[in-house]
Amino acid sequence: MPTQRADRRASLHAPTPERIVGREIVKLRRVRQYGGADHGFTLMFSFEGGTRRAERSRHSFIDRERVPDFEGEEAWFEVEQVSAKPWSFWRAVRRLEGPGG
């Protein structure tokens, strides 16, 4: 039989809503798998910059499910950083023409 304390810990909490903490315009580059059965399969997208947390990485990554389909290997997008649980993530909002275009 559960104790009273266990019941309190197991109580449901309202989920924390996503919060947009930043927006940038970046050039996304497609990262593909080379070799194996799924040769050419898009794994993710990368862009220079991003979080800059502790300067550990010069690139940030976006899951392929969070980027609209586009032709080619790279394109300009407006991206936003979303603060969510269990961790923050980037997502592409819309495609842009890019500088000078």
Image: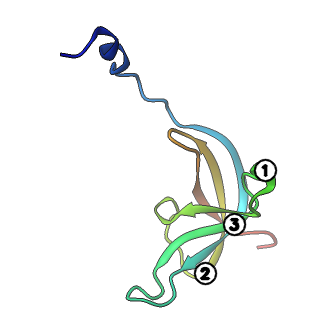
**Considering the numbered disc 3 on the image, is that residue within a helix, a strand or a loop?**
strand
The mark lying in front, picked from 1 and 2, is 1
Q: Position of residue 6 (x, y in %)?
A: 32, 17
Q: Earlier in the sequence, mark 3 or mark 2?
A: 3
How many numbered badges does the structure rendering display?
3
Q: Residue furthest left?
A: 1
Separation (CA) of disc 3 from disc 2 = 12 Å
Q: Which residue is identified by label 1?
A: 54
Q: Nearer the viewer, mark 3 or mark 1?
A: 1
Amino acid found under the numbered disc labelled 2 = Glu
Q: Position of residue 10 (x, y in %)?
A: 33, 21
Three-letter code for the amino acid on which mark 3 is drawn: Phe
Q: What residue does disc 3 label?
A: 47
Q: Quadrant of residue 21?
A: top right
Measured from the top left, where is residue 52 in percent x and y? 77, 53
Between residue 57 and residue 89, name the one nearer to us. 57
- Which residue: 58% across, 45% down? 88
